[in-house]
Amino acid sequence: MYANLIDANGKVIATVPIASDGTYNFANVPQNATGLTVQLSTTQGVVGQNKPATTLPTGWVTTGENKNGQAGTADGTANGEIPVTTATTNITTQNFGIQQVPESAVNSQTIGLNPGGTVNTTVNPNWFATSNVGANPNTQDYNGGTVENIRITAFPSNATSITIGTTTYYPNAGAIPGTCPTATCLAWPVGGVTVPAPGGVPSQTISVDPIDGQVIVVMPFVAIDNAGKEDPTPGSVTLIYTSILPVKLISFNASVNNCNSVISWKSATELGLQKYTVEYSTNGINFNPINTVPANGDNSTYNTTHQSNEGVIYYRLKMVDKDGSISYSNVVVLKVNCKTATVFLGANPITNGSLKVNLANVTGGINAKLVSTTGQLVITKTIFNGSNDIDVKRLAAGVYYLKLEGTDLKNSYKIIIK
């Protein structure tokens, strides 16, 4: 890298290499000169010749400049050039900001079975972070930066829809009657969809509905770092469907009801099918059977339950034909959180002026209200998981009621202050 000093006519009047510590220094420059520019470039200028192009190494971008060491005092454009006017004293701290852009993984997965119909495939979030194709790097940033988001840049190929979090996108939703069958679906936006992805791993569930048949679904995406810079060369997640079901499913879903997983599915056709076995996994790799039910024929509806555990559970259908051949549905993922919120109160009656409340397994903040026997609100405070102290020194001795209200907690307790 070089720093070139350019005069008002666009000619190079001095050029120096950038030192390994990022510094540069021009000596014997004209005094009291106006219209000068310090230029950052991979090309060293030639004194007396026109300035070279303002360029950075491949994979690097300009993030800003500051003049005299003060941000925002250059020309207002992050372009690798700083306007300067010389004086009779040294000028220092004409600073350039550059960074290496993040990388985006390239990952390809053979899914195998295409379930057909409107059954989604849940995309493993780690596929966006890790490359398994060629020498492509993992999703990452450099020089101390971090990847904070990804942007899916285009609607997936060979897909009828993509669901990100709770929103389903269609390629032409609303443009054609019936292409947006739910209240939360949208047309795919120009420029794509940005998804929070700390470290390159999306924090929202992403799933796609492939078109029927032996198809390849490609989701292009770019990593975005904590400076808001994107990888200029997109990565991708590719899903390869190599087979189709003799059974066509209309739906396959899992939900939580009173800490039990409810697995339900509906078939359109069941050509030669003998039975279904519902299987579960805690790691998405090793599956165990839950229940087996006989096939009831075309257009049948099924459901079964499974006692859920805390965490993420993966479910799939094992489908056995009458000739003994086996195929599998897509995998659905269920997040289970069935811990019971608990409250532990300290000494009651209270003699030391402090009401101690210990919370466990609560979601977010809990609104704690202390109310007198006449219904007057005397103290309100937001408390959280763990030990909490509520100062009651200013309250008169007597009976009060502690009311706790939150997402998963609504309790009342009689409190005595002595």
Image: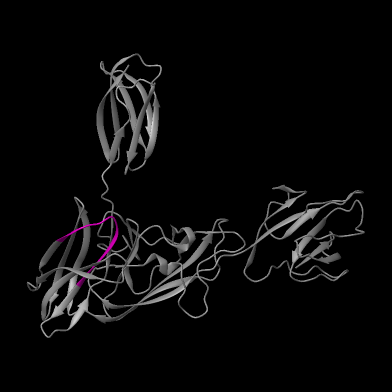
Identify the coloring. Answer: one colour
The percent position of residue 387, horizontal first and vertical second, equals 38, 36
Q: Residue at x 49, y 66 (%)?
A: 222
The percent position of residue 119, horizontal first and vertical second, equals 24, 68
55 above or below 308?
A: below
Our reading of the magenta stretch's main secondary structure is: strand
Q: Quadrant of the N terminus?
A: bottom right
Q: Is residue 276 magenta?
A: no
Q: Is residue 307 magenta?
A: yes
Specify the quadrant of the image occupied by residue 261: bottom left
345 above or below 157?
A: above
Q: Is residue 102 visible?
A: yes
Between residue 85 and residue 217, name the one nearer to us. 217
Q: Residue at x 58, y 59 (%)?
A: 145
Between residue 285 and residue 36, name the one nearer to us. 285
Range of magenta residues = 305-317
Q: Quadrant of the C terminus?
A: top left
The percent position of residue 295, horizontal first and vertical second, equals 9, 73
The percent position of residue 196, horizontal first and vertical second, equals 44, 56
In this image, 101 relative to 200: left or right?
Answer: right
In this image, 416 relative to 36: left or right?
Answer: left
287 above or below 376?
A: below
Number of callouts: 0
The residue lying furthest to the bottom in this view is 323
Q: Is residue 191 visible?
A: no
In this image, 218 relative to 233: left or right?
Answer: left
Q: Residue at x 88, y 51 (%)?
A: 90
